[in-house]
Amino acid sequence: MLSTTPHRLEEDLAAVEQIIARPVATAGELAANLGQLYEAAFGISLDRYDVASLTGAAPRIARAIFDLRLRVRDQIADWHGRGFLTLEGQKALRNALRIARYATDMLGELNIRYAQLGPDEKTLRGFTGHSVNTFVNPAYDNGEDIPFQAGDLLLMRGMHHNSAAIARIGDVDSQFSHLAIIHTDANGKHWVVEALIEDGSVINSLSDVLHHGLGRCVLFRHRDKQLAARAAALIHELVRHSNERSRRHIWYDFTMELAGDKQLFCSKLVRKAYALGSEQAFLLPTFTTRFDMKNRDFIERIGVTAKETFAPADIELEPAFDLVAEWQDYRVTSRLRLQDLLMDRLFLWMDEHDYRFQEDWPIKLIGYLGLLSGQLSSRAKDLISNVVPKVPPNMTRATIQAVAMLHKTAEPLLAELQALERRSIDRSGRPLHAREVYDFLEAKRQASGGEIGYLVGRA
């Protein structure tokens, strides 16, 4: 009985594959299929299998799930060309890709026996580790290290709560918070051109970026190599010149508006690059993220004025880009997943129960100190560094306070979820399923009297 567990999971995945292979003739059929795909993947929980007998097969099955995701993604151009990717279809597609990635993460975590990143350890350099850490598209796999190219895009996820919030604030949930473009100089060295909240538009070495505390990273490549190289070279020159003393630095654009280029957020920088490279003929994204929530309190506090935007994870649906490779450090993917699910609930409560952040004097003090951070002593800076590591000159006090309240609300809840998951692993050998996380958080909300950290309910 126990030895049949991998076979049983493969049968479940075969059912998923049948949904993927099912032909569609209308946009409605596609949305329905993708919805069924999400439900089927969501239903694949490790509590259905004997974990001990699954362990040895975990890397092979994780790779099979990655291949299934590639098969889904390879159909995007055709679906888009036929006019099938309506807003409903887009949301269903994003959900299906996200839940499949979580399944892969859990198998990777099982494969390393749920090892966690130690307090003095750093995450792996991106696209290193054992073979199971990196999945490569067979079309680009020659058995060697990934050869980065000019114009390649890096879709990334960091470790902080604000990264999880950026990934979840739109109308669709994602697992990524940052997008950047690679430039290759005349000597063959790779540079990353990116827009960071704290520093604005900057240029960093690819090696430094891949060493910089990443939890997951996906490499995308435009099919037109010349366009990609032009885009990278032009945005590199623009940012390089902007950082010279005689030029005006390009700070981060908190509005998330696509219009204008005096300030840029991460995805807008990539949009600008490909617009320059194509002489405005190729404008990203094909499918936008929308801010259509009823309660806009949080996004307005952080400065967002846009109704729709180019979010980092929108690149996952771009028909002109191939997914070349995907990497994750399985010692931190459980933390990222719990952060994601936690943010799901926080934003859901904001919208369904009209929860809003409410400042107190310590938060107001953090806001004031943040604005004065350039003039503060090192000791005073340490007081705010854990929630606002570096404050740019165009970051408002309201934004600083919102980030601080989000951090201080989410951190204790995350600690409880991590402890709950550790007990689940010790007891049953499996991590928490999303439904268990949601049930726990909803029970916390109902018992809270309408106050969760700095979130206060009004309905």
Image (cartoon, grey):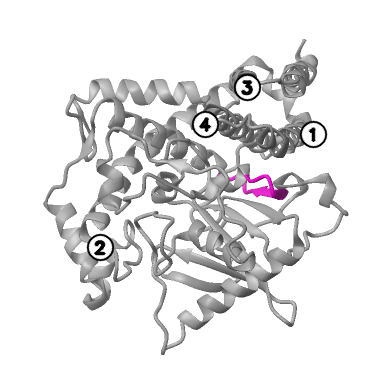
Residue 190, by quadrant, is: bottom right
Mark nearer the N terminus (4 vs 3): 3
Q: Are marks 4 and 1 in contact (CB under 8 Å)?
A: no
Graded by Cα atoms within 10 Å as few (under 14), some (14 to 19) or many (20 or more), the crowding at tag 3 reads: some
Whether residue 211 is visible: no
Label placed on residue 46: 3
Residue where numbered disc 2 is placed:
383
Whether residue 264 is visible: yes
In the rendered structure, the answer to whether residue 353 lies left or right of residue 193 reads: left
Q: Residue at x 62, y 42 (%)?
A: 317
Residues at marks 1 and 3, CA–CA distance in whole angstroms = 16 Å
Asked which secondary structure carries label 1, the reply is helix
Q: Residue at x 46, y 38 (%)?
A: 340
Tell me where residue 125 appears, x and y as whole percent.
64, 60
Quarter of the picture holding the C terminus:
top left
Residue extending farthest top = 1
Residues at marks 2 and 3, CA–CA distance in whole angstroms = 42 Å
Residue type highlighted by circle 3: Leu
Mark nearer the N terminus (2 vs 1): 1
Graded by Cα atoms within 10 Å as few (under 14), some (14 to 19) or many (20 or more), the crowding at tag 4 reads: some
Region of the chain picked out in magenta, as a range: 318-332
Residues at marks 2 and 1, CA–CA distance in whole angstroms = 46 Å
Mark nearer the N terminus (2 vs 4): 4
Residue where numbered disc 1 is placed:
60
Residue where numbered disc 4 is placed:
87
Q: Are marks 4 and 3 in contact (CB under 8 Å)?
A: no
Graded by Cα atoms within 10 Å as few (under 14), some (14 to 19) or many (20 or more), the crowding at tag 1 reads: few
Mark nearer the N terminus (4 vs 1): 1
